[in-house]
Amino acid sequence: MIELRDVCLQAGKFRLEHLSLQVNVGEYVVLMGRSGQGKTTILETICGLRPVESGTILIHGTDVSHWKPAQRGIGFVPQDHVLFPTMTVQQQLEFPLELRGTKLAERKRRIDELARVLDLSHLLARFPKGLSGGEAQRVAIGRALSFEPAVLLLDEPLSSLDDDLRRELHQLLKTVRQNTNAAILHVTHNEDDARALADRILVLSNGRITSTQDSAAFAQGKRNE
């Protein structure tokens, strides 16, 4: 579970004031809002990449507000995926496991499993250069999932994809959810992504959550506009 309680922070000229939200175990929540509203800032704060001025960040009930990023056990897919250019796809997937001292046999089991689920088996020896947008995005998702995190954060993971690839990744993310039961927070400005994936949709404006609704209510509201 992810929980923010009354969080305040400054990021350049942008400020988050008394932000509270919750994502339950097994829940897929989409956070929407125009560019510059602080969506990425919220993900970076949950990960520990930005410090909080006040308030509390809890992961499964534990206060991690001042923990280092690596201590929080969060899988994070940043915007534009940011793959390591000198690592093969297999090395990308294996890297988080090596950092955590996972034994070789377990690393192999996990990589084989991820490669099967994400359709990456034929790409394991490839380097990022030359991968398609959809392939690179699957690798980035696999890297975030490799150590089986209970929390997954996605920052505009489908923003650079065409409609066919976007629908393909919708199915992939639904599979990920079924296989992990993680608490997932997905940032996007795309309404189709929100309708296809979310249990619940939060709208962020001027550093505050201005509305929350389930995906069916969101879709009905859009049809009525």
Image (cartoon, rainbow, N blue to C red):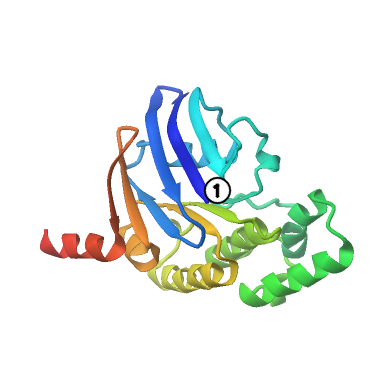
Toward the front, the furthest residue is 61
Q: Dot 1, how many residues are within 10 Å of its Cα: few (below 14), some (14-19), or many (20+)?
A: some
Q: Is residue 203 above or below residue 57?
A: below
Q: Is residue 155 above or below residue 130?
A: above
Asked where in the image residue 123 lies, by quadrant, the reply is bottom right
Image point (72%, 58%), residue name: 92
Label 1 belongs to which residue?
Answer: 78
x then y, percent, for residue 173: 50, 67
x then y, percent, for residue 101: 85, 52
Asked where in the image residue 90 lies, by quadrant, the reply is bottom right
As helix, strand or loop, the secondary structure at mark 1 comes to loop
Image point (34%, 33%), residue name: 207
Residue type, numbered disc 1: Pro
Quadrant location of the C terminus in the rendered image: bottom left
Q: Is residue 107 above or below residue 208?
A: below
Toward the right, the furthest residue is 104
- Front-lying residue, 44 or 78: 44
Report whether 36 appears left or right of 148: left
Report whether 203 appears left or right of 22: left
Image point (45%, 63%), residue name: 161
- Front-lying residue, 208 or 61: 61
Image point (44%, 30%), residue name: 7
Mark yes or no: residue 38 visible: no
- Front-lying residue, 146 or 132: 146
Report whether 153 appears left or right of 117: left
Mark yes or no: residue 137 visible: yes
x then y, percent, for residue 133: 53, 63
Report whether 72 appears left or right of 8: right
